[in-house]
Every structure is written in structure tokens, then in C-alpha cells.
Amino acid sequence: MRIAEHVYLVASGIQGCALSEDLDCNCYLFDSDAGLVLFDTGAGRDVDRIRAVIEGDGLSFNDITHVFLTHGHADHSGGAAAIGAAGKAHIVCGARTADVFAMGEAGISLDAARNAGVYPADYLYTAPVPDGIIDPGSPFEIGRLRVTALPTPGHSADHMSYLVRLADTGFLVSGDALFHSGRIIYQATHDFDVAQSCESMKTIAAQAFSSLLPGHGMFTVSAGKRHVYAALARIEAMSPPAPLQLVNL
């Protein structure tokens, strides 16, 4: 689904617009003019459905050259191994996310999420093996894209967001660090930290972007910074950002 010139939403589950398998996060695809660049991969339960969405937009799944992961949670990384194996895509993430993958399911609190019913008991997760580690703050050039990783812990200790420059437009791929209306996810996982989330809002607010592309729910094509300002207004009033209410149908 095209959302801006050279930018597509290619996966979105029950917490979004139901474009793909229910467990998937929002996954965004950029046409760099030197290959396709994917941000996050969904849970991996139906990669063929994501392929169909990409092909339906007139693009080729086999042209994916890079996959950037915001963090290790299964709904964001579960499809990475399959997508990497299916073509020539290089899996890229932060060093802390690579460490999480090496820990297996315990590193991403998947056992707790299964027990809570977030994932079905039969959900199988394959941790990807990253092909590259991105250094925060160092721009990564791919064709007409400039990708900069931003440490934004809080939702998880390894979380990173990505600032993507395309021509004169800045896109903030925020993963699960920030959602529409300045909200965040509160969860009883071992590395969730609301204080870190508050600090990450300041990191995000310092960036130049107009489009906010979060990991769930609604995205924006303009005026994206108003959503981080909404979070900052609560923080400045000595309150944490408002929680995002997830559905479980």
C-alpha cells in the first residue's frame, strides 16, 4: 500500500489495518533506487502474504536488499530469517538487538508473551542471524536513502528507531518507541523502562522529520512531530506518556 512517493506499508496486523497476518507489526518498504529497503518483518507466520502485498504494489520481493530491525520482539523480527533466506536481503540491527537474538526466546520475553496469550502456544520463532550491525548516529547510504539509527530504549532495552531521509523529506520509523497521539506500550517485560521511554522522546523530538511511521496503529504522512510533542507535554507535566491500548480479538 503506497503511503508516499517511494514509500509503502507492506505488512500490518490486528493492531494496525489488517493488511497481513494478525501478529504482524507495521512494516515499511522504501524504494531506494538501488534496491528495496524494509523496516521490520512481522512475526513470520505468513511471509508469502507480505510478498503478495509487495508484488501487488508493482515491486519485486526479490529486490529487497536490506532489512533494518527496530528491536528483537517477535512481531518485528520473526520474519527476518525467512526474508533473508528467500533472496539477497542483508539483515541489519543494533548491537544490543544482535545480543538479544543470541539469547533466543528468553531475550525477547517470548515465553512470557505466550503465557499471557499474546502469541498462540504453537507459535514458532526463528531468531535471525544479522548480516551487519549499524552504528547509532552514523548515516547509512543506500541509493537515494540516508538511514540513521537512533537509540530509543524503553519499550525494550535494545530498541532503536530509524530516521530515513528521502529527498527533502524525513521519515521517522519509530518501531514501538512512539505511537500516534504520543502513546507508548506499557508491558510487564524484563526490560521495559518508562523512564527510558521518556528520555527517548527527547531523542526523537530532536530529529527533523515530517512523517511518523510507528510499529502499530496509524501512521502519519505529515506533521509527525506533533505526536512526540504530545508525549513531551505529559512528561513535562510529570506524567508518563499515555498508554497505547492494544486489542486482542
Image: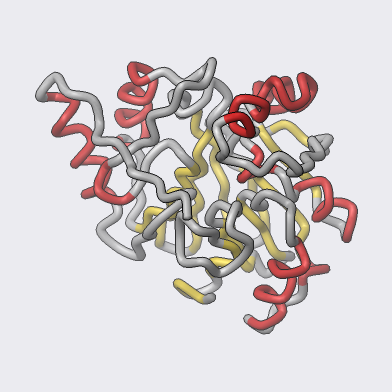
List x then y, in percent, for residue 115: 61, 29
Residue at point 68% right, 21% down?
107
Q: Nearer the viewer, residue 208 or 202?
A: 202
Q: How is the image coloured?
A: secondary structure
Q: Nearer the viewer, residue 45 or 101?
A: 45
**Relative to residue 119, is residue 86 drawn left or right?**
right
**Relative to residue 58, is residue 235 drawn left or right?**
left
Residue at point 47% right, 64% down?
167
All told, the count of numbered labels is 0
Residue at point 33% right, 16% down?
195
**Relative to residue 171, is residue 198 drawn left or right?**
left
Q: Nearer the viewer, residue 186 or 68?
A: 186
List x then y, in percent, for residue 205: 29, 37
Residue 59 quadrant: bottom right
Residue 24 quadrant: bottom right
Above or below, 107 against 144 in this view is above
Above or below, 187 against 169 in this view is above
List x then y, in percent, for residue 159: 54, 30
Residue at point 79% right, 22% down?
102
